[in-house]
Amino acid sequence: MIMPIDKPDDDLPQGVLDEMNRRLAIAMNARNAAPDPEMGGLSPSQVARLIYTEWGEPGAPVQLNTDIPLAELEKAQFFRTARTLLKALHAAGEVRATTSKNLPRRVVADALPLMCNDEELEEIYKYRKTVNEQDVPPLHYARVVSRLAGLVRLHKGKFGIPKSRVALLRDDRAGEMFTRLFTAFFRKFNLAYAHPVVFEARGLQTCAAYTLYRLGVVAADWRLLEDLPLEVLLPSVREQVEEEIGESEHWTTEDLLTGRLIRWLIAWGMLEGRYEQEGKFFKPLKAVRTTPLYGAVLRFNL
């Protein structure tokens, strides 16, 4: 950033300094408004608004459409899990939290059959007779994000749905619930908590709006994961991640981008993945593309 010039004691007249500062300000504003190829053709000013403006606010660069049928929204796995949990919690009424401030086992037991198929349930109960909330990470994350979104509250040791939010459980209000949860997930939830590696790489989440925008530009058709860091990350974010990784033989920028953002955008139905089959359980993700839900939910006003 160019700073105004302070007047030396015995130097230029104040009028001359004011004119120099004015011209510097004009030059700085012109630079901030100029498209930058390294920022996907956006100007620094556009990128700043995209990153720092709250999603969905009037005039904000990121807008979210709430007028989408429930059947379309339920294609997003994370939303299905969260909505199922919220409905189960509402049906149970206020329930006392555990000493670790998690959901009680009976709520977990009631919710699991509604969100898992028989094979998944068998795997969950394979090594334990009773299941706690944190034994099922998707359920745990859904509860945490729901609370951040204001859809669940913990009051006097009990979990419940705020009365003002109960209406969002209706089928015709599903779009509002979706956008609340989606925004809370990427703006309030600490994505590093759900991807516990040794690197913080905070810029991946801080600048997630830019990555979301760029995916819509470059990933309408299949794009290899190895190409994405150059295409969807700001240069400063990419450099930050590369610096943190250093000379690690086990991690790449592609790995962190995938673990921190891409896999969650798949869970949210914004992307679909193409996998390579390697054994029964391990299917490496190789390429992604945006889904119809991406275009239906997200609007970018730049």
Image (tube, rainbow, N blue to C red):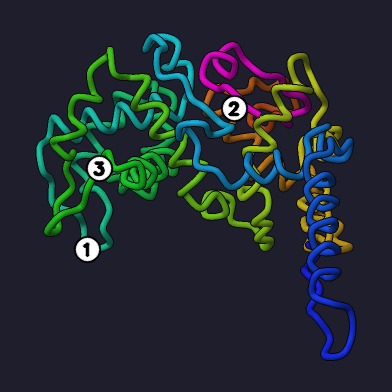
Label 2 sits on residue:
266
Any mark on residue 152, and which? Answer: 3
Q: Nearer the viewer, residue 283 or 240?
A: 240
Q: From where the camera sits, is residue 52 visible? A: yes
For label 2, count other residues whose C-alpha is less than 10 Å away and answer few (under 14), some (14-19) or many (20+). Answer: some
For label 3, count other residues whose C-alpha is less than 10 Å away and answer few (under 14), some (14-19) or many (20+). Answer: many
Q: Nearer the viewer, residue 98 or 29?
A: 29
Q: Earlier in the sequence, mark 1 or mark 2?
A: 1
Any mark on residue 9, and which? Answer: none
Residue range highlighted in magenta: 284-302
In this rendering, the answer to whether 10 lies above or below 195 is: below
Looking at the rendered structure, the secondary structure element under dot 1 is loop
Q: From where the camera sits, is residue 275 visible? A: no
Please name the amino acid that badge 1 sits on. Thr
Looking at the rendered structure, the secondary structure element under dot 3 is loop
Residue 14 location, x and y as percent?
A: 79, 75
Label 1 sits on residue:
99
154 to the left or right of 195: left
Please name the amino acid that badge 2 sits on. Ile
302 to the left or right of 29: left
Q: Nearer the viewer, residue 161 or 19?
A: 19
Instruction: Give the mark toward the camera: 1 or 3.
Output: 3
Is 294 inside the magenta-drawn segment?
yes
Q: Earlier in the sequence, mark 2 or mark 3?
A: 3
For label 1, count other residues whose C-alpha is less than 10 Å away and answer few (under 14), some (14-19) or many (20+). Answer: few
Distance (Cα) linking label 2 and label 3: 24 Å
Instruction: Give the mark toward the camera: 2 or 3.
Output: 3
